[in-house]
Amino acid sequence: MKSKKLSQVYDPEKFKEFGHELVDLLSQHLEEANHEDTLVHQWKSPAERLEFWQQYELDKNSPKTFFQDILKGSVNIHHANYMGHQVSPPAPLGALASLMSSTLNNGMAIYEMGAAGTAIEKIVIDDLNKRIGYDINSSDGYITHGGTLANLTALLSARRAMVEADIWEEGNTEKLGIMVSSEAHYCVDRAVRIMGMGSAGMIKIPVGENYTMKTELLNEYYEKAKSEGIRVIAVVGSAPSTSTGMYDDLGAIADFCEDKKLWFHVDGAHGGAAIFSEKYKHYLKGIHKADSVVIDGHKMLMTPTIMTFLLFKDKNHSYATFSQKAQYLLSKTEEEQWYNIAIKSFECTKRMMSIQFYILLKFYGEEIFEEYVTTLYDLGKELASIISQRNDFELALEPDTNIVCFRYNPQGKTQDELNELNKRLRSDLLEQGKFYIVQTTLNGNVFMRTTIMNPKTTSKNFNLLLDEIEGLV
């Protein structure tokens, strides 16, 4: 007997009805983001949120109220006062492409299941590799779900390339290590531990006053690791670091890796997108020498979460990382099958993420990414200038990017008092809901941390933020 409810679930007319309701609500959401009296979010405690959804009753005639309640309980990152985490306000056209991906649900392990997305992914990867400075005939890569997974995969590729033993079969047979800035994203540390290298395998290089890796110490730490029986196989350059948004000297790291015959990986999750900016791509000088590069689409390339480009200078490394048999999916040929992505990726099933980026590239042109990155980096420097001119505010350092760290620092306060004051001010600001920023710790001291992700943010929003902080003192 055919289920009446299942017929309703897949009814195209209902999809159209619900879809129109949702698009109308989201369009209103985008419009209200431009209103000064709109909150960035409506703060409630975790316990309050949990209770609300535990007791929730859904209208069985329409999901509209559910969509409305999700909007009320979510952060509006399209708001000009959103300066929180490194997540872009996605371009609405990219979000529609994401809806198409979710509706079609074509997994992309093999070409025959995800033909359109696979071909588009090849085009997008080649374009980014060319911008980095790779030879597109010998480079490769793919799109994966997030920088954490991409960085892990890149380091697995490094181990596969640098270690002669068959680790797939034998496991680690020697002590291995990865060298990285002490300000690197925590996912690198997590990757090292997942790979069985332990805490000793995470070799952190100190940073200087500008919070970038002191590359002059690379050889010293390399020799120290060697004397302790640790074989260093790779160095990771941050482009930029997460806490401060400062770029490591990629050229110096590249030269060191070339001299020692090490794998050079660039975590450009946030700032790799500067390859599109004529004004700021100098921060990436030397990136073309990297063996692998990670760039997040959902950070600085305006795509919905979660979408990350993992790029390899030598395509052979891309194919070798996960070499194993899966007869029901893969068949061995004389040529590597770029169109069967499961050969290269950690995932088997994955979404058609390529179309989210491709539609923006084709519809608006590559200049949209140039404009976005350059605008946001310019805004970071503008905010830093405004902070420097305000009494009782201290800039942590001159920013490279759209990540700006500062604190409220009136005279007569001890460091402990300043830390507690800035924690409290950030917390009060969060609960108030007019602005959304986060915090970080630099040299043991608490700083407020802004990441300007909305190109509609202006100096007016910056001054309102600082005024609001002063008003909460």
Image (cartoon, rainbow, N blue to C red):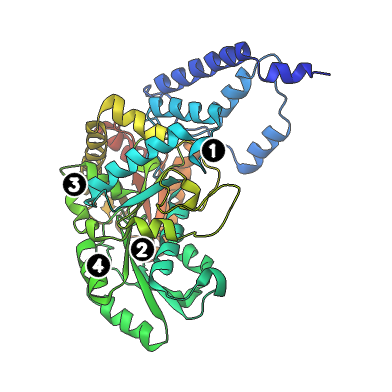
Query: Residue 12's image quarter?
Result: top right
Q: Position of residue 354 (x, y in %)?
A: 41, 37
Measured Cα–Cα span from mark 1 to mark 4:
38 Å
Pointer 1: residues within 10 angstroms few (<14), some, or many (20+)?
A: many
Q: What residue is pinned by disc 3?
A: 280
Q: What residue is pinned by disc 4?
A: 253
Residue type, mark 3 in image: Tyr
Q: Which badge, 2 or 1, is on the more N-terminal residue?
A: 1
Using the image, tell me which numbered label, if any, was put on residue 183.
Answer: 2
Pointer 4: residues within 10 angstroms few (<14), some, or many (20+)?
A: many
- Residue 379 sits above or below residue 157 on the image: above
Q: Position of residue 421 (x, y in %)?
A: 42, 53
Q: Nearer the viewer, mark 3 or mark 2?
A: 3
Nearest the eye: 368 or 37: 368
Residue type, mark 2 in image: Glu
Residue at 37% x, 29% y is 91
Outermost residue, bottom side: 227
Q: Which badge, 1 or 4, is on the more N-terminal residue?
A: 1
Residue type, mark 1 in image: Gly
Q: Secondary structure at mark 3?
A: loop
Q: Which badge, 2 or 4, is on the more N-terminal residue?
A: 2
Query: Residue 89's image quarter?
Result: top left
Residue at 46% x, 39% y is 305
Position of the N terminus, as image quadrant, is top right
